[in-house]
Image: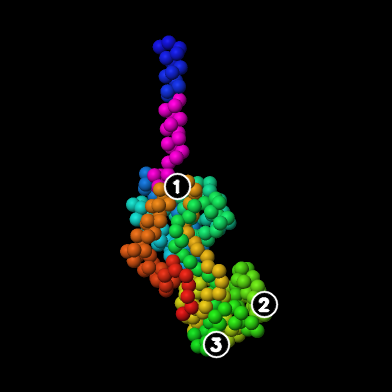
Amino acid sequence: MNISKRLSFVFLITLALSGLASVASAADLLDSVKQRGTLKVALEGTYPPFNYKENDKLAGFEVELANALAQKLGVKAEFTTSEWSAILAGLQAGKYDVVINQVGITDKRKETFDFSEPYTVSSPQLIIRKDEKREFKTLADLKGKKLGLGQGTNFADVAKAVGGIEIKTYPGSPEYLQDLALGRIDAALNDSLLIPYIVKKTKLPLKPGAPVGELEKSGIAFVKGNPQFKAAIDKALADLQADGSFGKLSVKWFDRDVSKAPVAK
């Protein structure tokens, strides 16, 4: 082979390898998931009723949702637990395919990640006594009243912005729910998705009150540039809605359809 032919051959091989590299780099996440046969899911594992450990096994709404989604994709869910502070960094580093952990869809996060269609919608919501006769439709209705909430939550800021509300903070929900049931405070405040769960667990004479804040939508987070995967995960979610599976899961864990905005009961 003379030099010119050899150079041409090397050039063609280089082009071919370059083309293969481009195809590989352009591979969609859906291809990787299908070839592997697993959907790598990250969650905290410490956030009931969404995801937590029971008898050393993962349980909760998002665990069951992840398994159902993986089944729709024709694969199995493979779980990794991570602290919240590191979970999105791990996604960006490629340690797993998705995060299913009540990740709020914000403009800031959308700069780095893509999201599925929302699967939960929540807001701050009041908790009141079952026999409450007064109407608390907004936080402004609690001016001059006592409102209980957990220490370290952002709900205090929401209430303080209204002004005139006597805010009492507690180590956790068991303490303020007990005080509410005993009439020591007039209402309590928590995330709308958690309220049915914690009220059911405590078995106290309480009920959900009015939603009183901005809505937040949460979705499944994954790395950008995977349009086929996004289409597939959105279709899987839509199929679970259509066949009733999502509704059953939702009612099981929250007593309502969490894909819709909360309403006062």
Residue 79 lies left or right of residue 189; in this view the side is left
Q: Residue at x 52, y 65 (%)?
A: 216
Residue 215's label in the rendered image is: none
Q: Amino acid at mark 1?
A: Asn
Q: Is residue 88 above or below residue 119?
A: above
Q: Dot 3: few (<14), some (14–19), or many (≥20) neighbours within 10 Å?
A: few
Residue found at the very far top of the displayed protein = 2
Q: Which residue sits at x=42%, y=23%?
A: 12
Q: How many marks?
A: 3
What crowding class fits label 1: few (fewer than 14 Cα within 10 Å), some (14-19), or many (20 or more)?
some
Identify which amino acid the numbered label 3 is placed on: Arg
Residue 32 vs residue 21, the one in the foreground: 21
Please tell me in which quadrant of the rendered image residue 138 appears: bottom right
Asked whether residue 2 appears in the rendered view, the answer is: yes
- Displayed quadrant of residue 183: bottom right
Counting residues from the start of the chain, the first of labels 1 and 3 encountered is 3
Q: Is residue 140 left or right of residue 235?
A: right
- The residue wearing badge 3 is 134
Q: What is the magenta range?
A: 14-33
The colouring scheme, among rainbow, by chain, secondary structure or one colour, is rainbow
Residue 19 forms part of the magenta stretch: yes
Q: Please say whether residue 58 is one of the residues in the magenta stretch.
A: no
Q: Which residue is mark 2?
A: 163
Residue at 43% in and 61% down:
63
Q: Which residue is mark 1?
A: 226
